[in-house]
Amino acid sequence: MPLEEYRKKRDFTRSPEPRGGAGESTGRIFVVHEHHATRLHYDLRLEMGGVLRSWAVPKEPPVEEGIKRLAIQTEDHPVEYAGFEGTIPEGMYGAGTVKTWDKGEFILEEEADKELLFELKGKKLTGRYALIKTKFKGKDSWLFFKRK
Ligand code: MN
């Protein structure tokens, strides 16, 4: 069930976040949310297979080559989440303010179990990027960086 984990973690009677439909697609998009939760982080979301595959990036995403960022994969989010900004109430999962840090076109180039190669056409993130699985911090950790 896509989005099962996403929905299980949230109470939509109290959170302003979208519940999400069944894989409604709006095209190839990416968004990076600036999430002022317990700890500020950035949520990278790529539209793939009718959902937004998501990674929490503890530091600012790389705008140039030579910077590798840890990215922890989190639950898939509904496509509608790309348009979400708001405040998740205290006591709820992900409590804090969510703002759009960057958004634009996402073009998938290669997809494998441990590697995603893609192009981003945003305002801050623009060019060819990669997400490569690493064992650095457990099974959900990836490295996110800009390619040559
Ligand atoms: Mn987050």
Image: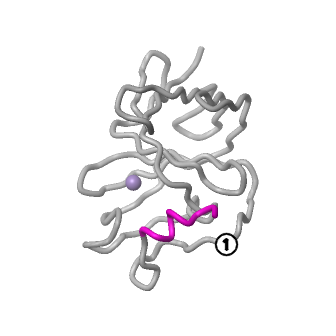
As helix, strand or loop, the secondary structure at mark 1 comes to loop
- Which residue is farthest bottom? 13
Identify the amino acid type marked 1: Gly
Q: In which image quadrant can residue 148 be found? A: top right
Q: Is residue 3 magenta?
A: yes
Q: Position of residue 5 (x, y in %)?
A: 50, 63
Residue at point 43%, 72% (across, down)? 10
The span shown in magenta is 1-9
| Mark 1 residue crowding within 10 angstroms, few (<14) / some (14–19) / many (20+) | few
Q: Nearer the viewer, residue 135 or 30?
A: 135
Q: Position of residue 62 (x, y in %)?
A: 45, 29
Cβ of mark 1 under 8 Å from ligand 1: the answer is no
How many numbered callouts? 1
Q: Which residue is mark 1?
A: 21
Looking at the image, residue 52 lies above or below residue 87: above
Colouring style: one colour
Q: Nearer the viewer, residue 48 or 33?
A: 48
Quadrant that contains the N terminus: bottom right
Residue at point 72%, 37% (across, down)? 107
Q: In which image quadrant can residue 136 be found? A: top left
Residue at point 31%, 74% (across, down)? 89
Q: In which image quadrant can residue 91 be found? A: bottom left
Looking at the image, residue 143 lies above or below residue 78: above
Q: Quadrant of ligand 1?
A: bottom left
Q: Is residue 92 magenta?
A: no
Looking at the image, residue 33 lies above or below residue 83: above
Residue 57 relative to residue 146: left or right = left
Residue at point 68%, 44% (across, down)? 105
Q: Position of residue 15 (x, y in %)?
A: 41, 77
Residue 87 relative to residue 30: left or right = left
